[in-house]
Image: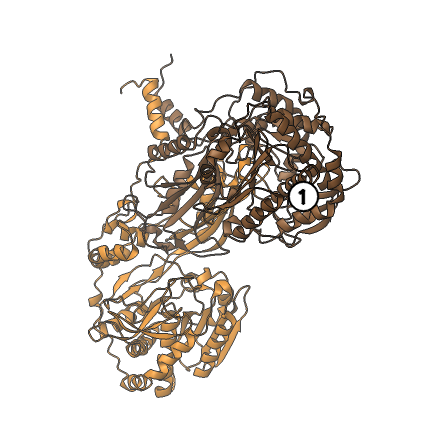
Chain colours: A brown, B orange
């Protein structure tokens, strides 16, 4: 072993102290070679021509239903129209023949409950969200709540409005399909529990209260469904079997006795010579959470994560070809010229499906306007979210953040959790999953199937708390969720592979019957 | 020399890599033992009883003049009433008998010029600022532009309004004094050039344009004066002989080809798995500029600073006793429980007078509202200011920041200078300084004298560009500049040592004569 001089030791010390070079992306090893083959699932053979005909005959009324929904604002973050939309949904359910309906008070915005008794042995829960994102101050080319139809080049006629695709459009399309079933066939093939929340866009902080209130009824259900536009611009359908969990928290530095700074108010900027700055504290504290290039640097943060299992690896192998094919286009749409830290498409998709994140959603201190104002702010806040994959939990993740801050000397930084829940997942081999796949197959579609999306939703209340399989799906295409000019296609142009509104509704008819058949594979729990 | 094992080497490397422990405050060595003794300057002996009597007889009208000024909003940051205030000031000068007056167009808000020809051999420039800070949304107990008189416990009757003390009150009080001189004695003892700007609160970005326009006239002047309330709540007067310079810049990280991220818009927060975050880049870049506890860590940043000279050290010795005496109270007013990183009062005052700063004035990225919104912002901005002491320059300071960012691998961070100018200073032994001191002495006051204040003003255009001595001063007390409920005392309560408005005006009469006498020590430059 070579003897190292103090000088070389110092040099290596300095090298270590220098900022980390581009950290390698996390290694996610795919050892399976087989790919999940969606074409192996037989096409659904059900046919409900009488119901389809009803839908076709009522297409104008059905479109008007979507317009009625998007014209009712329901911005949860600003408490704008939320109560009215909750009542509108409840009344619609009642009008459709739901036996029991109720607004469900919570500590936040109310939930909406509805029970449709079809006299069936099995029960399907339909998850809904009735709230929408705030309106962006610029960029909208129509009134976001006017429910206007717009001719979009390359797409056809679209409903352009806040909530058009996220999530009022597909949800009301599903209810249109349900209405057609009831009108033509008297009732749906399963009992239905609609359980909606008005705080999805806030991170679903009180949805567990809604679920808890109806836990007894929910425990009798056999599965959960969420209506969704899943087609891309090219008509390609996609399915996802799960969601990531989330931890959302704020880090706040403010003046205090230990590390100084004003505890009362901002002071003149020149006082930086004599007073401590909570903003520098926050910056320094945050900087200990990632490497120089933004990779997570919290010790042990990934330790809990289980490697992708065999099913997940097969699903990955099944979708990666399409993702590689679309990669350049996808980057272009995102306005980016590379994947994170130069990851390959394969690595980026592996991160998207199997890795956790640590993202700064917002950062604010002091004067944030244009031009010059010199103040020394007395507080600084960062909003941070972390997407959680199996087997992370919000509690563990937050504890690791706290531990790292403390270890680096930042115990003066306050950490406040605003939201947190674990991930959720249903197997591709679950009867509900196969039923959905079979319905796509009926329409000649082979969806790409992801074990989970990169985003989060509180599906754990179904999959984990209640132990129910959960599936989402539907035909139709929309875009612009959380952005200006959100839309859902209602009448695609001639050469399009996108479903029209009437076709999307027809799909929901088939899907509800197919899911109902699948539920019958589970032993009946009683009504 | 003990042989170190690779393990001990690694340990020391890790120790080095760990965040720095509390950095010691910069060492500023005071070797002088003598203190500047303000009582060594003889009291001014001039007496202008006829002018004082005029002021006393017109006290109601004079107060109304101040009210008229503060009732005209002039918020430079919001372009509210700026033009109107400029014209109001110009018209006032014309009304007083200024021979030439003009609004001075600039790339920003206009300056105001006025020349009063007293037929004298010497000329004094009066610097003024006619703009004010924006109104804070909460905290005002009166309408900020109504010019209300309020009885303040412990003070007496005050004029409470935006601009009352910063800087309309003392400036109009000075013009009241000038008016009395003209009415009683026909003219002031010197020619006067008023050169006002409407962008002081924006960092004086275009004041050099105003100066350049009148450079020929200004070069014939012999000194510069700025009227100011200098008394504290306890009546203690203070003088400062200079200001720090400033460098104000923005650091911006945005999506780019080299370090990735969206170049177009914010994206969904879950995309942190696959896209780079400009916000983390900004945080990491910022973190290389200070130690963990907020001390400047930019290599060489203090190298240009010259140590305090003998005069500055004597001034420091002359004021430190009072500052130590007031320290606990000062901290209490600031809402802080310690000086920066545990500095002693002596160290803190040394930093205030002789050290540079690096302060985050503002930090903004993504969602900054209440509650939860998950986005991955495509840009993040920090607003930073650095106060400059002799011999720093904005250019050198900015270059060192840029160099550090580049050296640490952050050449993707954009650095945008918004403002920058060098410090300014006049010797305590300059005739103008001694004249001002003598005037305080006439009123039995011994001001604390600082070689400079911690704040900045563009006085370099006078001291450096034009080579003129510059002094500011005045009696009177006000507070709340840049804060709600700004005020200036107009009629102090019975036991107060604060000057009334009439006394402050009387002081300006004496001061103008005393300054005029001092200017006569300089060779006449001609009109």
Q: Residues within 10 Å of mark 1 (few under 14, many from 20)?
A: many
Q: In the rendered structure, the residue with mark 1 lies on which chain?
A: A
User: Of all residues shown, which one is farthest toward the right?
Assistant: A494
Q: Position of residue B327 (x, y in %)?
A: 23, 55
In the depicted structure, whether residue B350 falls above or below residue B253: below
In the depicted structure, whether residue B362 falls above or below residue B525: above
Answer yes or no: is residue B409 visible.
yes
- Quadrant for residue B96, please give it: bottom left
- Judging depth in this view, the residue of B264 and A206 nearest the camera is A206
Please give left or right for residue A400 compared with residue B237 in the image.
right
Please give left or right for residue A186 compared with residue A395 in the image.
right
Q: Position of residue A405 (x, y in %)?
A: 36, 35
Please give left or right for residue A171 compared with residue B89 in the image.
right
User: Of all residues shown, which one is farthest toward the top?
Assistant: A1
- Judging depth in this view, the residue of A430 and A418 nearest the camera is A430
Answer yes or no: is residue B121 visible.
no
In the depicted structure, whether residue B114 falls above or below residue A101: below
- Quadrant for residue B200, please give it: bottom left
Q: Which residue is mark 1?
A: A488
């Amino acid at each position: 072993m070579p003897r190292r001089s103090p000088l070389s030791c110092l040099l290596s010390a300095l090298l270590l102290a220098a900022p980390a070079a581009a950290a390698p992306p996390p290694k996610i090893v795919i050892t399976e070679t087989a790919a999940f083959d969606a074409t192996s699932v037989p096409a659904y053979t059900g046919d409900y021509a009488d119901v389809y005909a009803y839908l076709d005959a009522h297409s104008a009324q059905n479109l008007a239903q979507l317009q009625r929904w998007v014209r009712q604002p329901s911005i949860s973050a600003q408490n704008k129209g939320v109560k009215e939309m909750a009542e509108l949904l409840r009344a619609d359910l009642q009008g459709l023949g739901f036996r029991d309906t109720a607004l469900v008070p919570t500590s936040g915005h109310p939930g909406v409950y509805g029970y449709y008794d079809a006299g069936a042995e099995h029960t399907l829960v339909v998850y809904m969200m009735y709230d929408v994102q705030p309106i962006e101050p610029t960029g909208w080319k129509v009134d976001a709540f006017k429910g206007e139809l717009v001719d979009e080049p390359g797409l056809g006629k679209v409903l352009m409005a806040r909530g058009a695709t996220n999530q009022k459009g597909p949800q009301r399309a599903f209810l249109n399909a349900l209405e057609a079933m009831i009108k033509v066939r008297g009732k749906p093939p399963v009992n239905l529990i609609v359980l909606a929340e008005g705080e999805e866009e806030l991170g679903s902080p009180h949805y567990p209260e809604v679920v808890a209130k109806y836990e007894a009824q929910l425990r009798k259900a056999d599965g959960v469904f969420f209506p969704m536009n899943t087609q891309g611009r090219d008509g390609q359908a996609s399915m996802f079997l799960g969601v990531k969990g989330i931890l959302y928290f704020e880090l706040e530095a403010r003046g205090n006795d230990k590390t100084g700074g004003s505890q009362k108010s901002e002071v003149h900027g020149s006082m930086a010579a004599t007073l401590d700055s909570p903003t520098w504290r926050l910056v320094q504290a945050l900087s200990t959470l990632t490497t120089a290039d933004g990779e997570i640097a919290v010790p042990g943060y990934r330790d809990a994560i289980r490697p992708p299992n065999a099913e997940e690896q097969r699903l990955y192998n099944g979708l990666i070809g399409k993702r590689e094919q679309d990669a350049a286009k996808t980057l272009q749409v995102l306005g980016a010229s590379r994947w994170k830290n130069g990851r390959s498409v394969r690595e980026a998709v592996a991160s998207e499906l199997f890795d956790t994140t640590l993202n700064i959603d917002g950062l604010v201190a002091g004067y944030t306007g244009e031009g010059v104002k010199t103040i020394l702010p007395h507080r600084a806040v960062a909003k941070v979210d972390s997407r959680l994959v199996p087997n992370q939990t919000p509690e563990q993740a937050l504890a690791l953040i706290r531990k790292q801050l403390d270890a680096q000397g930042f115990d003066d930084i306050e950490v406040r959790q605003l939201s947190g829940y674990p991930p959720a997942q249903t197997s591709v081999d679950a009867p509900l999953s196969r039923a959905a796949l079979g319905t796509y197959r009926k329409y000649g579609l082979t969806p790409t199937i992801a074990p989970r999306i990169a985003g989060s939703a509180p599906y754990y209340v179904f999959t984990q708390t209640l132990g129910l399989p959960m599936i989402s799906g539907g035909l139709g295409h929309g875009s612009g969720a959380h952005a200006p000019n959100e839309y859902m296609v209602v009448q695609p142009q001639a050469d399009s592979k996108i479903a029209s509104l009437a076709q999307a509704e027809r799909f929901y008819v088939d899907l509800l019957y197919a899911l109902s058949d699948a539920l019958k594979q589970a032993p009946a729990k009683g009504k």
